[in-house]
Structures are given as structure tokens and as C-alpha cells.
Amino acid sequence: MAVQETPVSRRLKSVRHIIIVCSGKGGVGKSSVSVQLALSLHASSPTARVGILDVDLTGPSVPRMLGLDGHGVHQSSDGWVPVYADARADGEPRLACMSVGFLLKKKGDSVVWRGPKKNAMIRQFLSDVRWGELDYLVVDTPPGTSDEHLSLIEHLAPVQSRLSAVIVTTPQAVALLDAMKCLSFTRAVALPVLGLIENMSGYVCPCCGEISNVFSTGGGAEMARREGVPFLGSMPIDTDLVTLLDAAESTDQGATDGQQDEVSEVRSFGVLQRYQKTSSAKLISALVEKLISTLPSVEHVLMNSSA
């Protein structure tokens, strides 16, 4: 039985996999994990095309982490053009980003919206943004299970066969308890879980490399085992990564208006090169290999999307 086409399904028809990153509580590093997943998926193949959508509407941090603060979204005849962070040698961009942070007049402005306006914004991100052909669309969500999550699931229902989730937690008992609620939500809405990541699992000393278990460790792996969810891996606190994502600066070189008519300006992607030198990059790369191996084949995805 064919699924009824919607503006969202038409816009996302060439997106093979949509990975929703969620967490039960704030402060577990969900956004930094989302950015790392996007960077590592981008680096997983010379031709991989990746999008990252920031639907943490009241706390958009992805533009800052990618060094894209201060850039605006451009309107084309075919919808909003995402902010591109890189380009191949032939000039075709491979990492697209969209966030409410690009729409604020001042990056310090607060977003004070009720549920209906949040829902409308998410629908517009999915149906009006010119995502084009993507291998992966990583969606960074707010903590918990709120209006944004329900809106996502509702609008993405026509492409449900391409949806999956990654849950981020830290090792503490309180974080694990909230991660269980997040897992319960995914089960309630029939959202497949690719796996669980235990973030902030220890601290790597920048001098000697010794790992100290500041927040305990192993809780995420135990929860995954108990709940029958794949455990993707543990990520220790990496001071080099914190410095990189916290201090990322825009690499915009100031293109003219004429260069921005139909496509957003393409930028050199210094964040990726610097990220690949961190210890976290090696860990997340192995984690991404596990994640990719659990995704359905492209042929299966395309067959389901056209059914």
C-alpha cells in the first residue's frame, strides 16, 4: 500500500537515512555527539553527503560548534538553502546545516515559543529546506521527550522506514534513569534505536593520557545489555574536543551578494581537519562504523520509500 505523499516526504525523497539523536536529560553532550556523528559520517567516504538539522529550538548550539555562527539562511526559488560547511574539489557541498540559530537577528536572542509555533518551525525545516540528495540527515533534538520530538515523528511518518534513533547518556544513575524514559518514548512511537552512546565516560588527562572515571563508567553498557539495545561505545571527556567545539570560529571569507544568489556560500571546512586530530575522532569513527553496519541497506530504504 502506497504511503500518501506530503510536502515533507517530497522534500526528503532523496535522503537515505535520518538519524534522530536524543537524550533523556540535558547536559549529557547530546549536541556535541550529534556534531561528531555528522563530522564522522562526512569523513566516512569521499562522497558521503550529510545534513545536520538542529531542532533544539530554544538552545541552538550546532552553528557555533561547526564554526558557522553569524551566517544567515538564503531563500531560493526552490526553498531555503541550508548553510554549507564544506565542498568537494569540484565545488559541490557535502555538509549542510540548518538551525534556528541562523534565523536570529542576534545570537543571544531568546526563542520564546509555544508548542504550535515550534511545530510550524520544524515542519518548515523539513518541508521548505532544499536538502537535496543526502546519505545521512542527523537531527539534534532537545533533551527529554517534548513537543519537538512529537512534531518530528508526526511530520516524518511518511518516511518512517528511513528513521532511526541514537540515545546519548552519561554513566550516572540519574542520567541512566532519564535515558530509560527516552528509550520508552522510542518504543511508544515505534522508532528503531540504532544504539546507545555513553558520553563523558571518564576523563582523559591531556598530559599523561590516564583516564579517570569522574562520573563512574559502564552504566550505559549495562543498560544497553539489560534492555536489548546495541551499545555503540563510550566517549571520555576530551579537553581538545571541548576547546575545538566551544571556540570554533566562522571561516566565512566574505563572499559578495552575487555569489550567494542561488546557493549558500561554500566554506573551507577547518573544523573537520582540526576535529580529526582529536582523540575523540578516532573513537567516534569506530562507533560510526558500528552504526553504519546496523542501518538498513540503501536498496531496502529506497524500495520502502517508493512502496
Image: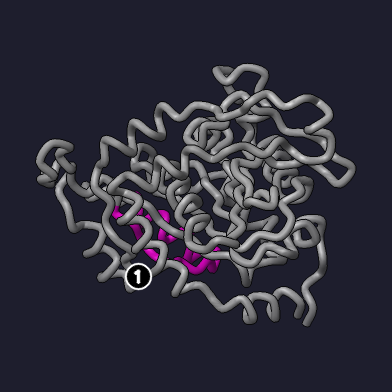
Give the number of callouts. Answer: 1
Compared with residue 267, is residue 216 higher up or lower down, i.e. above or below? below
- Which segment is the magenta one? 178-198
Q: Residue tagged by mark 1?
A: 230
As drawn, which residue projects farthest toward the right?
Answer: 77
Residue 121 or residue 150, whichever sits in front: 121
Label 1: few (<14), some (14–19) or many (≥20) C-alpha neighbours in 10 Å: some
- 87 to 191, vertically: above or below: above
Examine the image and state in which quarter residue 32 appears: top left
Magenta stretch contains residue 193: yes
254 in magenta: no
Residue 206 falls left or right of residue 199: left
Q: Quick check: can you spot residue 173?
A: no
Q: Secondary structure at mark 1?
A: loop
Q: Position of residue 193 (x, y in %)?
A: 45, 66
Query: Is residue 176 or residue 52 the one in the foreground?
Result: 52
**Residue type for callout 1:** Pro
Residue placed at 72% from the left, 47% from the top? 123
Q: Nearer the viewer, residue 300 or 142?
A: 300
Residue 136: % across, % down: 58, 60
| Colouring of the image | one colour
215 with respect to 94 (left or right): left
Quadrant of the rendering where the C terminus is positioned? bottom right
Q: Quadrant of residue 97?
A: top right
Q: Residue at x 69, y 52 (%)?
A: 90
Q: Nearer the viewer, residue 198 or 92?
A: 92
Identify the residue at horizontal 23%, vertical 50% (top origin).
171
Query: Which quarter of the rendering shows the N terminus?
Result: bottom right
Q: Is there any visible trace of residue 222 in the rendered image?
A: yes
Residue 80 locus on image (x, y percent): 78, 40
Q: Position of residue 263 (x, y in %)?
A: 78, 40
Residue at the image position 54 percent from the left and 68 percent from the top: 190
